[in-house]
Image (spheres, rainbow, N blue to C red):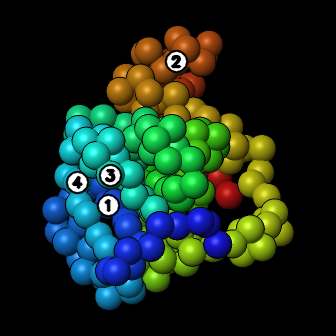
Amino acid sequence: MVAAEVFENGPTLLIVDDDKAFVTRLARAMEARGYAVRIAESAQEGLSAIHQDPPSYAVIDMRLGDGNGIDLLAALAAKRPDARGIILTGYGNIATAVTAVKRGAYDYLSKPADADDIDAALRATGSDRAGLPEQPMSADRVRWEHIQRVYELCSRNVSETARRLSMHRRTLQRILAKRAPR
């Protein structure tokens, strides 16, 4: 297990998410599991909490109204290298998961994740980590994920996405209109 700082109230956990209802439910559930929980509802509040008193654990939303969760995770890793942080997102794709892990995320969970999943991810040891998938994604799925990532980075602008991908605009529109391949 990570060398987590344990206080009277348990290991410290910072939850950074701009969904107030979700944060409140998750905080209660994690307190019931023994964590001393602090909440931040914006990237700025999260950064301030990390600098004031870096937590043992962090659960950070990928997209915040005023920033990016991966940047907060990097700040936590710089301030407290033994901290264990996970990224939560409703916009999961492979590229962002890889980026999150490279920037210090211990795990990457898609919303809606429940408190049991989050607790298991925070407390997992190296042997608990997921292995290689039995059925890896197809090349078509990987291509589709990449297109979706670029599309999101271009603020869902089809023309700009097509230009960056060196693809005809109509071809891109047809791809975006289809369901994700398996």
- Work out which quarter of the rendered image holds the C terminus and state it: bottom right
- Asked if the residues shown at circle 1 and circle 2 are in contact, with their CB atoms under 8 angstroms apart, the answer is no
- Work out which quarter of the rendered image holds the N terminus and state it: bottom right
Q: Which residue is label 3 attached to?
A: 53
- Asked if the residues shown at circle 1 and circle 4 are in contact, with their CB atoms under 8 angstroms apart, the answer is yes
Secondary structure of residue under mark 3: loop
Front in this rendered view, residue 54 or 38: 54
The x, y position of residue 118, in whole percent, is: 47, 72
Q: Which residue is label 2 attached to?
A: 162
Three-letter code for the amino acid on which mark 4 is drawn: Ala
Q: Which residue is label 4 attached to?
A: 40
- Please give left or right for residue 40 compared with residue 119 in the image: left
Q: Which residue is label 1 attached to?
A: 15
The x, y position of residue 38, in whole percent, is: 25, 63
Image quadrant of residue 15? bottom left
- Examine the rendered structure and indicate whether residue 65 appears above or below residue 39: above
Image quadrant of residue 103? top right
